[in-house]
Structure formats: structure tokens, C-alpha cells
Amino acid sequence: MRVQLVTMPWHPIDLPSLQVGLLHQLLRQVRPGDEVREFHGSLRWAEFLLERSGGRLRPGDYEAVGSDSIFHGLGDWVFSGVLYEDENWGVTKLHAYARGRQLCADTLDTVSEMRLHAAEYIDRCADEVLAHDPDVVGFTSTFMQNVPSLALARELKRRRPQLKVVFGGSNCEGPMGHALHRNHPYVDHVVRGEGEYAFPALLAHLDAGTPPDDVPGLCWWDGSGETQVSRANTETRRTVAPADIPSPDYDQWHAEIEASPVIEYVYPKLVVEGARGCWWGEKHHCTFCGLNGTAMAFRAKPGERLWSEIERLVRRHRILDVVTVDNIIDMAYFKDFLPRAAESGWDLRMHYEVKSNLSRDQIALLGAAGAVLLQPGIESLSDRVLDLMDKGVTGARNIRTLREFDNHAITCTWNYLYGFPGETAQDYARVLDQMPALVHLQPPGGAHRIQLERFSPHFTNPGLGFGKRRPAEMYGHVYELPEEELADLVYLFDTEDAGIGGDIEDRLMRAVAQWRAGHAASTLVMQATGEDAEALLVHDQRHGWPPRTYWFNGWQAAALRHLEDGRTEPALHRRLTADQHAVSAEEVTQWLAEAVALGLLFSDGRTYVSLPTRTVPIRIDREADGAPDGEPAPQAVAG
């Protein structure tokens, strides 16, 4: 059997498709007689835009649409005219939506120009895919890959009706997969859930010409012609064991990107997978998070195996940038995988998602192992709002984590989320009063009201505060489907605003914008001094604060050091007296208040944490650094 594996826009062009790489290697192992090819449509689209626009539409424009417009559906809209065979389809709806959301005019101009090239691009894709005479074409679809994938699938089936088209990926989880199938008759099969067991089983049925009614979760057409019916097999609770997850094959992708004109604009990276699911979410599913869909159960490869996979890929492709797709790091990796990476001596640059309550030693190990970009899921600095999220962490602990990232030259990416049912202005007031003191720490990418995500507790339990919901407005210019079908097909939903609004929301937006604006020129660094190095100098060069140097000795210097780990006021006093410092509880209370007023400490209402870093953090000016146009600034998503 000839199998073509396809990934369409808007997959990041600097990354190989993990799904394609896994399935390619899996089929090589379990169906060695098959001929497997890959079609990297995302890379082809970036090349096509560069060519057809005469160099005006660059990979940086591709990445901006692919990463920044997920919550507006602009990438899908680019291809909706091709899908519905009407170049004007959705144009009026998009412009009305854009006016209501005050979208950037330049962004609209960019996607409108891209849309002019979409039909020709889909034709060229169909030519290239069918040139290899495939029996089966498998699409992987996540976020804004649905419409471009459907547009190509429709064209492939129009030209070659006997071809079998299969969809899978995150956009096909649960009811989304069945809705995608029953509304698009040119899609023969949809794999809902993980594909390592289901896809080979489907191919076996296609070989034998038998109905795939025993493949768990599979959607398929029963019957023929006008009598055919979309069937959705019962989904299984069985998850794919780590031992059955192959190491991805990226040979075809690497050869193609190395030969592509796009290589001048991007830094290629490798993608690896150590774990699936979320060990925190198994017991405390963050209320806003829809990640993992129906497969929350946490599973991880042994650390030695993960290291061997990374070692093989790095040696084979000579790429040191490694992106892990794990939703959360396996804590066992601090004992096996990370020490091995640190001891390798390689100049790895790893990207990882972690929980924010890491210890100083764990953050130091991540830095030593080559972790340069972390997504710690901080999301808020208010204890009560974090409790409403069920994050299992405090605001003071999040501040401590931000400080330690600077101490170990680790970039972090996060967003400040708000709009949780039950939150009040009072929950934000204390943080907002102290936010100017945080300007030297890495700021959030922005402040964003949460959106209702399918599979999140907010979605599955309307009693948490979001009883009214409807498919997000953006889908009106993406799909030509009735609302009842969209309700099953889509991932994002609109609902009534909850939580804060008005003046306190405006204060939050302004405070985050000021933090971001002042960060690059801000430092707050403490330095040991004196004959015994027990005294401390704190050099304050923060934006918005007068330049000062503070000198602390005795119990005050000791207090500032102890508060690096965060302590309550009584705990700090007990520690100081245990260290033989003659200080009263009243003196500690007064000093804490003064240090908070000077912006040297952060308090979440119970715990105090020191704000000065031990080193001057590295600041990177992307324009001065000469980063390629296609290399985007780090982006954060809820997680």
C-alpha cells in the first residue's frame, strides 16, 4: 500500500511534524511492505507565498498568522474560499468581525493577500500528492489546519474518487471528529484519539476490504451513495503505552527544509516527546485548560530512552534546538534524563513545559541541561485566582520561579489570565499595587480574558460558572455550517464574561503593558560584600524607580537571603532568632513593610519573597541580534 502523510498550514515551518514523523516510523515497523511518503504542506505554503509575492510575503508573515491569529481563525479563513469554491466567501463576515474586535488593518491586508494565492497553492499540492499515486492520504490536523486540510482533501477526492482520505490529530478528538466526518463526505475516515493503534488497524481493514467497525473511536461511512451513513465507533479508554510510541523519523523533513529557500529565514528545531497526558491534571484539572482532550492519563518514556532518542536525532540532523511537546515534565526526569543531558557537554537549547513550583535546584538543573525556554504555566500572581484555577501554587511561589529563571539564564513564556468565575477586584488589587516592583522580572506576553475551551472543566461542568455558551464568533467566517454542527466541531466557545471588568480590568491591562515596556532596561541585583561577604548591596536600576543602591547587614541581610525561598512573617522571625540574631517580631514587621514599599519584596498576603536577582539577567535585543524574520518572539498559551 502507498501511504502519503500530510501536514498542512499552519504548522510552524521551523519544526518537523511530530505526528508525521511518528506515524512514518510506526508504519515502517508494523507494515514494512508499505511505501510511505510525506508531504510538508506548511513548508510548501511558505515557499509558495515567498515565490508568488516576489518576496513580500515572508516566513515571518506566515508565522505571524499561524501563531498570533489562532483566536481569530484568520489562517483557516485564508483557505475557506477554496473549500467553498467562492473567492468572496466569508469576506464580509471577516470584515465585520474585524471591526468589532479592532483587528490590525495590516494583519487583514496580509491574510487577504495570502488568500489570493490559496487556490493555486491547493492545486499545486494536489498535483504533487497525486504524482506518487497514493492509495491512502492521511492528514494530521491541529488548531488552524482544518480548513486547508479539508480544501486539499476535497480536491484530491474530486480528482481521484477511489483514494482513501483519513484525518486525525487534536482537531479530531471526541465529538469534533464525528462532526468533521459527517459534514465532509470526501473525508473517508477520522481517527479520534491517539493513532498508534488505530491507524495500522484501519489500514489492515482497507487491505482486506472489510468494514472497520472494530477500530475504537474511528469514524467511517457505512453503505454507499445517498444511503451511506457516518458511523462513529465507541472510543476506548485505552491509551498508547510509552513502549509503543516510536522515535520519530525526520529524514524527509530535514532534507526538504535544508533545500528550501525558507532556510534563510528560520532556525530549524527538532521535536521530541517524552510524555503524554498531565500528572497534575489527572487529580487537579486546571479549570480553564482543554489540553489533552480525552487522554489525560499521564505516561512517560524512561529518561534513558528519551535521552537516546534526542542523542540520535541531534547526531543525525546536526540540530541542537530541541522542542519537547510534553504538557508537563515528568518529575522523574530530574533524576535521570536531565542529569544525563547536563553531563553530555552538548550545547543543547531545549524548550520545555513545566509546573511553576520548581525548586531552585530543579531550575538550576534545567539550566545546566540546556533548557533555555520554559513555559511554566504561571498564569496569575493572586493566590485566590490561582485557587480558582486549581493550579496548586501561590503567587509568591510564581514570583520566586520568575526570579530563579533570571538567575539561571532561562527565558520563560507566560500569559496573565483573568476572567474566572468568582474572582473579585480585591483579588487583583494587592498584585497590581506591587506590579511596578516586578518590572525587572520576565513579564507576561499579555493579559488575556480566558476563553471557554472544549474538554476543560469550565466546559464540561457548566456549574463552574459558564452555563451559556456558543461556538466562538470567529467560526462564522471559517465554516459554512449550522450552529448545532459547529457546536460539535469546534474547540473554542464564547460565553458571558465572568470575573473582573471595568476599572480593575483596565488597571491590569495597563500594568502588564507597562511591565513589558520597562522590562528591557530594568535590573534589581544583590551582591555580597564586606570582609565576611555577609552584608548585601542591592543595586536598583528598575524603570520607574529612582536609581539607588541599598546596603544591608546583620539580620536584615540574613532576612533578605532567607526570603529568597519565601517565608511567612512568623517563619522568618523564627529563622532569624534560630540563627542567633537579636531581633524582635515588631522589628521584623516594620522591616518587611519598608522592604515591600521599596519594591524589594513581594507579598501575596501571607508569604514574602525577595525580588533581587543574584546576577544581571541576559537581555536579548532581537533586532540587534539579527534574528531572521521567520523567528518569532516566544509565544505563550494557556496550559
Image: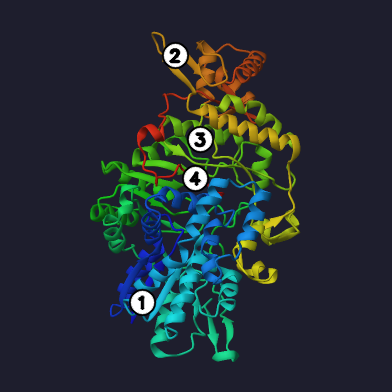
- From this view, report whether residue 25 is shown above or below residue 62: below
* Mark 2 crowdedness (10 Å alpha carbons): few <14, some 14-19, many ≥20: some
User: First in sequence: mark 3 or mark 1?
Assistant: 1
The amino acid marked with disc number 2 is: Glu
Cα distance in 3D space between marks 2 and 3: 24 Å
User: First in sequence: mark 2 or mark 3?
Assistant: 3
Q: Secondary structure at mark 4?
A: loop
Cα distance in 3D space between marks 3 and 1: 51 Å
Residue 401, numbered label: 3
Cα distance in 3D space between marks 4 and 3: 18 Å
User: First in sequence: mark 1 or mark 4?
Assistant: 1
Cα distance in 3D space between marks 1 and 2: 73 Å
Measured from the top left, where is residue 554 in percent x and y? Answer: 51, 11
Give the labeled residue for mark 2.
534
In this rendering, which labeled residue sits more in front, label 3 or label 1?
Answer: 1
In this rendering, which labeled residue sits more in front, label 2 or label 3?
Answer: 3
Measured from the top left, where is residue 241 in percent x and y? Answer: 43, 66
Please give the count of numbered marks on the rendered protein. 4
Left of 264 or right of it: where is 536?
right
In this rendering, which labeled residue sits more in front, label 4 or label 2?
Answer: 4
> Cβ–Cβ below 8 Å for labels 2 and 3?
no
Q: How is the image coloured?
A: rainbow
The amino acid marked with disc number 4 is: Gln
In this rendering, which labeled residue sits more in front, label 4 or label 3?
Answer: 4
